[in-house]
Image (spheres, rainbow, N blue to C red):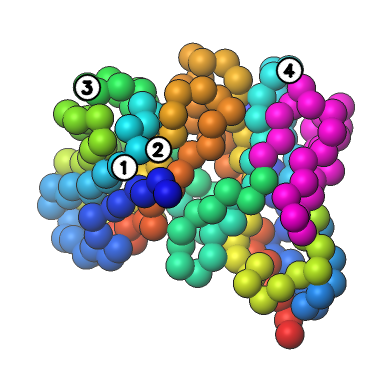
Amino acid sequence: AQTVTQSQPEMSVQEAETVTLSCTYDTSESDYYLFWYKQPPSRQMILVIRQEAYKQQNATENRFSVNFQKAAKSFSLKISDSQLGDAAMYFCAYRSALYNQGGKLIFGQGTELSVKP
Amino acid sequence: DVKVTQSSRYLVKRTGEKVFLECVQDMDHENMFWYRQDPGLGLRLIYFSYDVKMKEKGDIPEGYSVSREKKERFSLILESASTNQTSMYLCASSPLGAKNIQYFGAGTRLSVL
């Protein structure tokens, strides 16, 4: 079975600085998708970024980028120029590319990010 | 914009009550999911459905059942609520296909007293 681990329950960053959130996963599959979701205090989960395992290039979305290391099964999220609105719980998630998995997401434990003004 | 609507933000029920959590999506998505969120455990899948009247157990189905009579609506049922079912419940939907992202509702915080 696949597992996702986020070893940092809490992180803190100064406004305008850069922070990296860690995520490791375990799988025997070669084709899958990885996601970072953000859950602000409003509780609405929002997709931050998505990485396809067969693509070597790291995904980037504006100030958000990932460092995807397939061999090491590592998928970290870097937030540049942190803003107060980035304060939230961040979840790393795995999704198998196999249809019989039903498309379910497997989540890590979450990392609570605070941004200091 | 995709909209996933959960009928209640907060719910307080008594032990032994039958509880219905409703979820409606407006994007004609085939897949719908119910997750439970607990501190330190992340989100765990309770049940999912990939078509009307179809359902599959997730990782923690015990004590729960689901119903999907229409494509846009997916209900989570607690047959006899217990205190250990006090939690945040999140509904999500997505089109078929593993690369497609899941869209989430705002969650229902359920307290069972």
Q: Amino acid at mark 1?
A: Gln
CA–CA distance between discs 1 and 2? 7 Å
Discs 1 and 2 share one subunit: yes
Above or below: residue B79 compared with residue B5: above
Which mark is first along the chain, 2 or 1?
1
Dot 3 falls on a residue whose secondary structure is: loop
Q: Is residue B34 left or right of residue A103?
A: left
The percent coordinates of residue B27 (x first, y second) are: 35, 38
The percent coordinates of residue A24 (x first, y second) are: 75, 40
Quarter of the figure with residue A64: bottom right
Which mark is first along the chain, 3 or 2?
3
Disc 2 target residue: B93
Disc 1 target residue: B25
Discs 3 and 1 share one subunit: yes
Disc 4 target residue: A30
Which mark is first along the chain, 1 or 3?
1
Quarter of the figure with residue B95: top left
Q: Amino acid at mark 3?
A: Lys
Residue span colored magenta: A50-75
The percent coordinates of residue B97 (x first, y second) are: 51, 23
